[in-house]
């Protein structure tokens, strides 16, 4: 009994010391309003959840983490303003976010020039692609799989199913355009022929005109590349037009909201996803399974976020980003360059979205084996057959 009381005293004392220490500020900005709020808002909740867990475990070298929250509203200009505030006013040690590729690209140059370690939660690849056009990515990392990785997972599945001719329907935004680049570039590698292409504005509410053109093509399947409600509209329009071609969505749409919006039209739709979406179907020996199960328990049972924002493929992005940054801080402290270097040296981190192995050339660190193909079956996501 005395030993138990002593242990409880030490734990309480340690927690008090962490709370009393000077906090390490991390800027966290997401789409908390606007068209991608259904992704950005739960991402913020997960960021708060993981910071709470880290702080209850002693913080980072005895110091608590403190999030400074910002709402980009999906606006690149707003994102830039918030990033400047994080860096020059709030004096954060690192930045997490934003939500969309366009806002990520808007702040990329700024954080690079400021030398601010930034772990983005965007889907598109350009934020961690270099060259004269896209600029350096020395200080920028991202936790979701690259678009190119998702395309490889999708094309590998199509090849296995003998579906060689595809029609593309993509959003005319940063994420959609990035998808098109990789869908076109990687097609020959998998023996895929793109026989038709159409696009739409991300806020469009009807895609029947584009789908009618694709219906009349020699395609064996339709590949749609978008996030948010637009994907569900495509699914419904396809059924309304009586198009028998199978529909494949991108890695941004495995989300109960997609099924809710598309209804029965979503049945049979397939897409690449993180293992989070089908954790109970994973084999017992998968090293991610216990990690994901712990996350799900916290999200659903402890914090009860699932009641308002059911778990989706985006749910683990902030968890992985903040954990990787916190682990690097424990090793290298908060000096920007040392922290950046430590983040880049991350190896074997078992996360929600995969097992991360970062390098100087790859600031994502996830491969195709981090993804699975899922399909909508009786109103839920299951491993695709």
Image: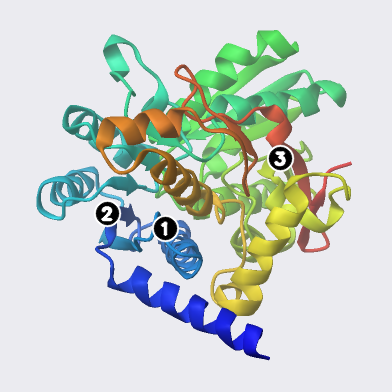
**What is the CA distance from the residue labelled 3 to the residue labelled 2?**
31 Å
Distance in Å between CA atoms under marks 2 and 1: 9 Å
Side of 235 where 118 appears, left or right: left
Task: For residue 266, say whether it is visible.
Answer: no
Residue at position x 22%, y 28% in the image: 109
**Who is closer to the viewer here, 357 or 40?**
357
Tell me which residue sits at (45%, 36%) in the image. 142
Sequence-first tag of 3 and 1: 1
For residue 162, what is the image quadrant?
top right
Q: Quadrant of residue 24?
A: bottom left
Crowdedness near tag 2: few (<14), some (14–19) or many (≥20) residues, C-alpha within 10 Å: many
Q: Which residue is mark 3?
A: 247
Contact between marks 2 and 1 (CB within 8 A): the answer is yes
Up/down of 338 relative to 84, above or below? above
Verify CB contact (< 8 Å) between mark 3 and mark 1. Answer: no
Asked which secondary structure carries label 3, the reply is strand
Where is residue 297 shown, x and y percent of the image? 68, 70
The residue beneath circle 2 is 72
Q: Which structural element holds mark 2?
A: loop
Residues 21 and 42: in front is: 21
> Where residue 237 sits: x, y (%)?
62, 50
Residue 315 seen in render: yes
Residue 40, labelled with which disc?
Answer: 1
Dots 3, 2 in contact, CB < 8 A? no
Q: Give the quarter of the figure containing the C terminus.
A: top right
């Amino acid at each position: 009994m005395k030993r138990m009381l002593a242990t409880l005293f030490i734990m309480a004392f340690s927690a008090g010391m962490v709370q009393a220490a000077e906090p390490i500020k991390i800027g966290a900005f997401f789409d908390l309003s606007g068209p991608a709020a259904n992704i950005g808002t739960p991402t913020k909740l997960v960021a708060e959840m993981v910071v709470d867990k880290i702080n209850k475990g002693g913080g980072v070298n005895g110091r608590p983490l403190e999030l400074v929250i910002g709402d980009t509203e999906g606006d690149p200009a707003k994102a830039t303003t918030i990033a400047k505030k994080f860096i020059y006013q709030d004096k954060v040690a690192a930045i997490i976010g934003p939500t969309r590729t366009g806002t990520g690209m808007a702040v990329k140059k700024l954080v690079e020039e400021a030398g601010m370690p930034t772990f983005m939660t965007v889907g598109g690849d350009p934020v961690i692609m270099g060259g004269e056009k896209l600029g350096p990515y020395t200080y920028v990392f991202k936790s979701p799989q690259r678009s190119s990785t998702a395309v490889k997972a999708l094309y590998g599945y199509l090849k296995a199913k003998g579906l060689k001719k595809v029609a593309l329907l993509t959003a005319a935004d940063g994420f959609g355009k990035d998808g098109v680049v990789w869908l076109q570039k990687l097609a020959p590698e998998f023996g895929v022929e793109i026989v038709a292409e159409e696009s739409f504005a991300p806020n469009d509410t009807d895609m029947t005109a584009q789908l009618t053109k694709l219906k009349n093509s020699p395609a064996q399947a339709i590949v749609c590349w978008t996030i948010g409600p637009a994907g569900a509209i495509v699914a419904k329009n396809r059924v309304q037009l009586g198009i028998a071609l199978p529909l494949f969505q991108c890695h941004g749409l495995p989300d109960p909201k997609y099924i809710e919006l598309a209804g029965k039209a979503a049945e049979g739709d397939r897409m690449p996803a993180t293992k989070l979406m089908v954790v109970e179907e994973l084999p017992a020996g998968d090293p991610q399974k216990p990690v994901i199960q712990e996350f799900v328990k916290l999200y659903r049972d402890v914090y009860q976020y699932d009641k308002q924002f059911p778990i989706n493929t985006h749910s683990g992005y902030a968890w992985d980003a903040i954990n990787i940054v916190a682990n690097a801080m424990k090793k290298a402290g908060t000096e920007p360059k040392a922290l950046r270097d430590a983040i880049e040296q991350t190896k074997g981190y078992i996360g929600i979205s995969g097992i991360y192995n970062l390098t100087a050339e790859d600031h994502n660190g996830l491969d195709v084996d981090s993804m699975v193909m899922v399909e909508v079956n009786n109103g839920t996501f299951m491993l695709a057959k």
